[in-house]
Image (cartoon, rainbow, N blue to C red):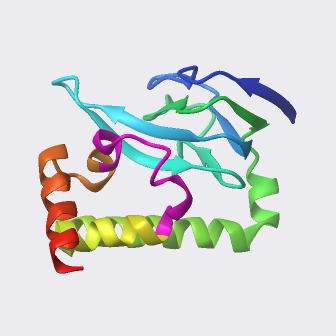
Amino acid sequence: MKQINVKKGEILQKSGDLNSKVYKVNSGLLRSYTIDQKGKEHIFMFAPENWTIADSQSKETPCDLYIDALEDSSIVVLTKDIQREGKNVGAFIKRLSVLQKRVVMLMSFSAIERFEHFEQTYPEILQRVTQKMIASYLGITPEALSKIKRERIKKS
């Protein structure tokens, strides 16, 4: 375990890396994402303060996700350790639950419902990330996100 400071834009992990790490955010903001064959980014997760972010692959398997810093950040870098994770079953189950809800949401919720869920899940980072990143996380275009926001303003 070691604490490091990373600058905005710094890439901590690239898709295909071996022996990927677990990152706990003390301050700042990280994200994990994939890049498809057309070069489009798809954000998997944001990690603000007190969140942990990692690729789910084992240490010996090439990872799927990129992880980078969206802000200057102070993070704790941990090696992947099944025994440590096993001792923290509650956090592991919570992480699985959040991921399951995200998959179900992407399959069955409307874009408006996904945005509302994003607001509830990440209220502290709405103003810290770009609209393009929020749209990527939601699986919609930035234009569709703008339309959702305009419609919500009209209703209020």
* Side of 38 relative to 6 (left or right): left
Q: Can you tell which quarter of the image residue 71 is in?
A: top right
Query: What residue is shown at x 49% (from left), y 28% (from top)?
Result: 62
Q: Is residue 86 left or right of residue 104?
A: right
Q: Who's the residue at 40% across and 47% down the image?
A: 44
The image shows residue 68, relative to residue 141, as above or below, that is above
Quick check: 151 above or below 45? Answer: below
* Residue 149 on image: x %, y %: 22, 62
Q: Is residue 73 left or right of residue 103?
A: right
Q: Quadrant of the C terminus?
A: bottom left
* Span colored in magenta: 121-134
Q: Is residue 17 above or below residue 45?
A: above
Where is residue 95 shown, x and y percent of the image?
58, 65
The image position of residue 84, as x and y in percent, is 81, 55
Which residue shows up at 65% across the image and 65% down it?
92
Q: Is residue 119 magenta?
A: no
Work out whether residue 93 or residue 2 is closer to the camera in this orientation and state it.
2
Q: Quadrant of the N terminus?
A: top right
